């Protein structure tokens, strides 16, 4: 976006705020969406999603402040203040992907905006090539804890722990010093973190049950080894599920679960798990639906929400115009649902469905030779 256009966007933001202050309920009708493309193919797939959304004539305003690799070149930072300010005022955020440059943006969206529930639906669309024999009907949801676990990055030199906790012994009876030189990483699970993600998963299972899904929550931990942290996660899920007598509950260890996702994908409904396990299982499960090119996600907190494809920045194909925009477009479907535009979300999802059912316009990751813009255009055509 040019500087001038960006300034206009900022003025518009002010106008919206003013009207919100003046209106009786302070309700803002036009939803404000901030698009942050990030790095690599991120901006390409987010632009595709924007084109699709704009073709739908929705009551939304999409703002596109500079960010990521492009912003570093121009402003010397991946996340200029204007972009952050707009993000802070947004109703929803569309995010692309991160390589090195935008890691800070991702951290901001997850930790500073506290978008603690990462929803990763695994849903098979007819016509999509997948290694699975009979994929029709695969439709489940991974709820990944997004705010704690290993990912805030508490790592360091083992000597630090040896010095600070000289008497601490592990289950083998060894102190940190006994292990000699090396590094550590700390996994933190909190009561609050476990409780809110367990509740989120149960609410989703309840919502899905109303739509005809089994109403089952599968908790995934490694509590046989990580007894304290994994144990807390598992116990908390078991407590929270008691408030949902209509739901079924089961627990599997993560290694067993990896196998089950492939072996029994149609038995899954809502899977709830911690940060790293959710990260790994969701990439694995994405293959059931045809790969990362198809897999959308939503990161939701109490005030903010952002929507991003599960895939990364794919630097090898960045700028070639061949990235599959579907995961980003399906993330927009999740965004429309979040914003309360259910019918529109369904319309858009159906357009995607039809394109794959026909199977004529496919990007290279799906075995075709269409471009990002061809897929985008095909979806827009189906919306007409
Ligand atoms: C994802 C990504 C991120 C994660 C990376 C980029 C930090 O892999 O969203 O799954 O691991 O959470
Ligand atoms: Mn990942």
Image (cartoon, helix red, strand yellow):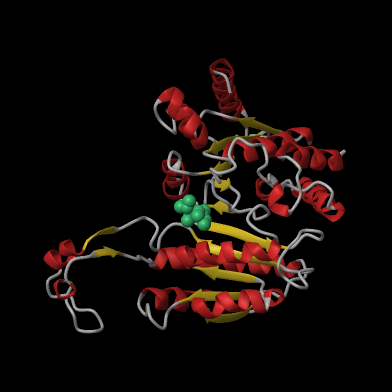
Among all residues in the image, which is located at the extreme top? Answer: 4
Q: Residue at x 47, y 44 (%)?
A: 99
The correct choice, above or below, for 154 with respect to 64 in the image is below
Q: Residue at x 62, y 66 (%)?
A: 285
Q: Residue at x 61, y 50 (%)?
A: 309
User: In the rendered view, does 278 fall on the left or right side of 28?
Assistant: left
The correct choice, above or below, for 208 with respect to 76 in the image is below
Depth order, front residue of 264/190: 264
Depth order, front residue of 350/286: 286
Q: Is residue 32 visible?
A: yes
- Quarter the C terminus occupies: top right
Determine which quarter of the picture holds residue 162: bottom left
**Residue 153 x, y percent position in the rendering:** 34, 56
Q: Is residue 25 visible?
A: no
**Residue 135 x, y percent position in the rendering:** 76, 69
Depth order, front residue of 244/367: 367
Q: How many numbered marks are there?
A: 0
User: In the rendered view, does 49 fall on the left or right side of 253?
Assistant: right
Determine which quarter of the picture holds residue 244: bottom right
- Quarter the N terminus occupies: top right
The correct choice, above or below, for 330 with respect to 101 in the image is below
**Residue 341 x, y percent position in the rendering:** 73, 46
**Residue 317 x, y percent position in the rendering:** 60, 42
């Amino acid at each position: 976006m040019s500087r001038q256009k960006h300034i206009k966007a900022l003025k518009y933001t002010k106008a919206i705020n003013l009207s919100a202050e003046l209106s009786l309920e302070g309700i803002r009708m036009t939803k404000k969406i901030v698009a942050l493309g990030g790095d690599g193919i991120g901006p390409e797939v987010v632009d595709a999603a924007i084109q699709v959304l704009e073709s739908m004539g929705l009551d939304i305003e999409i703002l596109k402040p500079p960010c990521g690799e492009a912003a570093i070149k121009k402003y010397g930072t991946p996340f200029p203040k204007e972009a952050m300010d707009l993000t802070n005022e947004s109703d929803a955020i569309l995010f692309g992907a991160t390589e090195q440059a935008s890691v800070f943006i991702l951290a901001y969206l997850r930790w500073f905006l506290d978008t603690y529930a990462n929803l990763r639906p695994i849903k098979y669309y007819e016509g999509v090539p997948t290694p699975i024999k009979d994929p029709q009907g695969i439709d489940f949801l991974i709820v990944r804890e997004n705010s704690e676990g290993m990912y805030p990055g508490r790592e360091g030199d083992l000597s630090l722990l040896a010095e600070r906790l000289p008497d601490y012994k592990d289950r083998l009876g060894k102190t940190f010093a006994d292990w000699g030189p090396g590094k550590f990483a700390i996994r933190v699970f909190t009561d609050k973190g476990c409780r809110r993600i367990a509740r989120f998963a149960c609410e989703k299972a309840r919502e899905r049950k109303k739509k005809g899904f089994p109403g089952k929550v599968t908790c995934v931990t490694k509590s046989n080894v990580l007894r304290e942290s994994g144990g807390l996660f598992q116990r908390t899920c078991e407590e929270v599920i008691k408030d949902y007598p209509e739901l079924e509950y089961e627990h599997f260890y993560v290694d067993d679960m990896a196998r089950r996702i492939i072996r029994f994908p149609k038995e899954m409904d809502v899977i709830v798990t911690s940060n790293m396990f959710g990260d790994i299982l969701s990439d694995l499960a994405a293959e059931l639906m045809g790969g990362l090119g198809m897999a959308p996600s939503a990161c939701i907190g109490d005030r903010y929400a952002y929507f991003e494809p599960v895939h990364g920045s794919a630097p090898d194909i960045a700028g070639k115009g061949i990235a599959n925009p579907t995961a980003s477009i399906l993330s927009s479907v999740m965004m429309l649902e979040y914003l309360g535009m259910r019918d529109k979300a369904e319309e858009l999802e159906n357009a995607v469905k039809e394109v794959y059912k026909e199977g004529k316009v496919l990007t290279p990751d799906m075995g075709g030779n269409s471009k990002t813009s061809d897929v985008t255009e095909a979806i827009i055509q189906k919306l007409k």
